Image (spheres, rainbow, N blue to C red):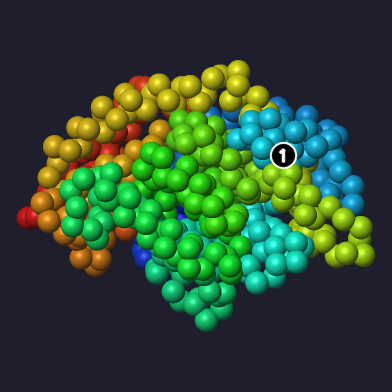
Amino acid sequence: TYSYEELYEKNAKYLWNPFTQMKEYLADQPVIIERGEGRKLIDVQGREYWDGVSSVWLNVHGHRVPELDEAIREQLDKIAHSTLLGMANVPAVLLAEKLVQIAPPGLSKVFFSDSGAEAVEIALKIAFQYWRNLGRPEKDSFLTMKEAYHGDTVGAVSVGAIDMFHKMYAPLLFPSIKVPFPTLYRHPYELADEKQVVQRYLAEMEAVMAAQAHRIAALIVEPVQGAGGMIPMPKGYLKALRELCNQYDILLIVDEVATGFGRTGKMFACEHDGVTPDVMSVAKGITGGYLPIAATLATDRIYDAFYADYEEFKTLYHGHSYTGNQLGCAVALANLELFESRHLVEHVTKSADHLADQLNSLRELKHVGDIRQKGFMIGIELVADRTTKQAYPFAKRMGVKVARRCRELGMLLRPLGDVVVFMPPLASTIEELDSMVKILYQAIAEVTLDDER
Ligand code: PLP
């Protein structure tokens, strides 16, 4: 075993962490995790922390789940991996069937991959090629939302729109058409009525579609804008988008990477509006947070456009060395069984009301500007002034400060600017949720008060 100091030194010397400014990270005495147990992470010094963001939004049941551990062991006794290129494997076939059974009705085919970003890349390639296969190559552009996040690979970045993550790479990207996401807390219209605000957003979307449908392959959306600040679409909005896409002959891609697998209180967030997209990307919670599996689902209409004699070159040219990995598919299957046997989606729906009550207590704190919640997907936006919604200056790093304080109090979080993200594991009990919210309250109270001094 190694001491913290030794591991820290090796981290500094050899490891370049993702989405991390290494200078700041190394100055901050980073946590080095050794173990997990239920909803907790335990570091090499034996300190315990609540896993307050489900290890970046994907842990479902907690850590060291006996059923999931066993599923991997069982699969390991047969085989760890073989390719899906030109052949199949048992857990991949069974997982594809299971996904179709639980997906919004009409999604009938599953294409596997290894990460959310890749599941999005595949969705984009499918939508782009769909129109070519149909002899309509002029439909080659994508509509996307401002502040969208769909992953960090070049195609996914091209349909993303968060300046901090994306602007730097602009010269590398293909252009996409960006339309405002319906945000109710901050919107540009001088209207008090929420319904009217939503109508204005929709009208903007329709105007773009009406003018440019001839060259648009697909619209890609997150049902809850995640990295953009945890902003749920207003009820009915996705349905309205589905109808507009039908009207203008534009494919609808729904990115359920963050929202899928119970996170919002339905198995998939599309279900809140009874929508079936043409293409849907999923990842994160699919394996319960165990192994890197992702999937892109499509309808028969899409799949049929690729089903042809080889000479016609309608093949989807995508697939990686580890696509459809057996260990990953086996643990995903076991995870989805646990969803059923433990009635996990119902648990999220039921506990979400209690959680909302608890989170309400944060409104006592005058720098809490907005609390946005959809199931167990929560963003708490801190503001310098609640009346004017004035943001804190970036340099104050309020979100980072709150996360640091939470860490001292025993919970690990990762903020998005001044939005404190709270994404507890779905299986968290009421008592566990209460303990986590208590830490949130104390950290936000102390950090914002400290700032005023
Ligand atoms: N799409 C959405 C909506 C996401 O929130 C994320 C990750 O946070 C991704 C795609 C990318 O997923 P991954 O990190 O697995 O590549």
**Going 54% across and 52% down the picture, which residue do you hit?**
247
Q: Is residue 403 left or right of residue 313?
A: left
Dot 1 crowding, Cα within 10 Å, few <14, some 14–19, many 20+: many
Q: Can you give x and y, in whole percent of width and height, for residue 256 in the image? A: 54, 45
Identify residue type, mark 1.
Answer: Ser
Q: Nearer the viewer, residue 408 or 158?
A: 158
Label count reads 1
Question: Is disc 1's CB within 8 Å of ligand 1?
Answer: no
In percent of width and height, residue 197 lies at 27, 51
Quarter of the image for residue 394 reads bottom left
Q: Residue at x 40, y 69 (%)?
A: 163
Against 222, residue 313 (above or below) is below
At 78% from the left edge and 29% from the top edge, which residue is drawn? 74
In the rendering, at what x and y percent does residue 452 appear? Answer: 9, 55
Kindly identify which residue carries mark 1: 108
Q: Considering depth in this image, is 326 or 223 the residue closer to the camera?
A: 223
